Amino acid sequence: MPLAVLISHAHDERLLAEAWKALLSTVSQGAIAPWYSSDRQPDGGMQIGEEWREHLRREIQKTDYILAVLSPQSRDRPWILYECGLAAGIAQEKKNINGQHNLTGVVIPILYSMTAGDLANPLASFNVYMGDSKDAVIEVCERLLQQAGLTPQRNLWATPIDRYMDAVAAHRPRRAHTAENMILWRTRIEALVQSGRSGEVYATRARMYATFGQPFRPMNVQLHDVLSKIMLDEKHFQAAIEETNFGLELAPDDIDLLHRKALGLLHCHNRDKALQTITQLVALDAALASNPEIAGLEGRVLREIWENSRDPLDLSAARVAYRRATDANASDYYCAVNAASLALAAADTFDAKNLFDRALQGVRKAQEKQPISYWTDFSAGEIALGQGTLQLACEEYAKGLTRVPAPPARDRESALKGVRRMAALGGFGPTDIKPIEHLLG
């Protein structure tokens, strides 16, 4: 009777099981009968219409050895542990019944892209072999042939061994990523940014995750923090959300990551989830509800909701969010400008005038301090539009474009949206703001 060998494997590593079946069948000339559950041959694998647990138990009942195909991705799969545990239990039952210390049911772990030190109990208690080592594979074949009552003949194995090794090279699982790997990639990404090559980070990120393989487990919050910011800047908003989620697995209460996630969700037009994330953020500390960055983002989300619904209640909610930050921070001008624009939208000219005056005071103070951000000048330009002074608005936007560092395309585009919105509220037509559009374009 042929020696029965069951090859236990994860479904996505089926081709490795197939390679073992071909190798053992060839070198033994039929004296070894390999079987694995996902075999697609008509006479292999699970039979159609048959209850799989019972079929598997019968196969393991008659199995002499189990080859457990293991990689960093499959070493903890319940299916493999179940098959190996069931085999070990059946082997012990046979031993107790007949009193023989035979090798029936012995598990042979075959490792890929990992070492014995990476293997956890109970499989770590067996002798392990490296499935991507030609010498180790030959040793497994020799031992199984001896158990089948044959004399191994290495001189006849060159071709089947080479075919097996070719299959392994084509389908070898990736090694598990380590904290050191992640630091290495973070260093590479930061070097790209420092050399002015941020546009290359998206493609670099794709190569990084291809190297890490699946399933991916975050290990370095700094890497995801850096990537989430770059992905936002480069307008890869879905990637930015993915990076913030990875970072939040390691630092679930990080305020900047939560803020960045909400911003990414807003850019993806998922306004409800953006508001949920802001609510989650404020729950960490009620004082954050008045923080200009947090309240400003909340106001921005609510303003977009109002722009789609034109519901006065949504307009009122957006005004409240911006006003909350403005009232709590005397030097804030960003939220004051937005609160003023929404006051215009609500035809509350008195409140709009007071808010524009307050915002302008904050801007002028900021323009007296070095370094001066281009956003300060852009805010001054937006205030000028709201107050009806078009020429002053042009001068402020032109001034902002001379600042160092210069505004990137993403920020110029954002400023242009503010120009068009404020111009419409201030009564200016498309022709009136052409000079500013030319500047920011």
Image (cartoon, grey):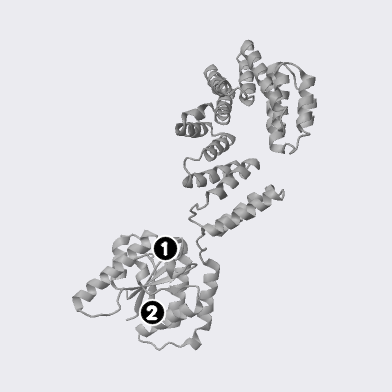
- The type of residue carrying mark 2 is Ile
- Earlier in the chain: of badge 1 and badge 2, it is 2
Classify residue 427 by image quadrant: top right
Q: Position of residue 145 (x, y in %)?
A: 39, 83
Residue count near mark 2 (Cα–Cα under 10 Å), binned few <14, some 14–19, many ≥20: many
- The residue lying at 55 percent from left, 22 percent from top is 328
Is label 1 in a helix, a strand or a loop?
loop
- The type of residue carrying mark 1 is Arg
Q: Which residue is mark 1?
A: 75
Q: Position of residue 389 (x, y in %)?
A: 76, 17
Residue 303 vertical placement versus 189 (above, below): above
Q: Is residue 41 visible?
A: no
Residue 47 vertical placement versus 256 (above, below): below
Numbered label tally: 2
3D distance between C-alphas at marks 1 and 2: 25 Å
Q: Which residue is mark 2?
A: 32
Report if the CB atoms under discs 1 and 2 are less than 8 Å apart.
no
Classify residue 150 by image quadrant: bottom left
Q: Position of residue 79 (x, y in %)?
A: 36, 61
Is label 2 in a helix, a strand or a loop?
strand
Residue 361 located left or right of residue 118: right
Specify the label residue 325 is tagged with.
Answer: none
Name the one closer to the observer, 186 or 300.
186
Which quadrant would the C terminus be assigned to in this image?
top right
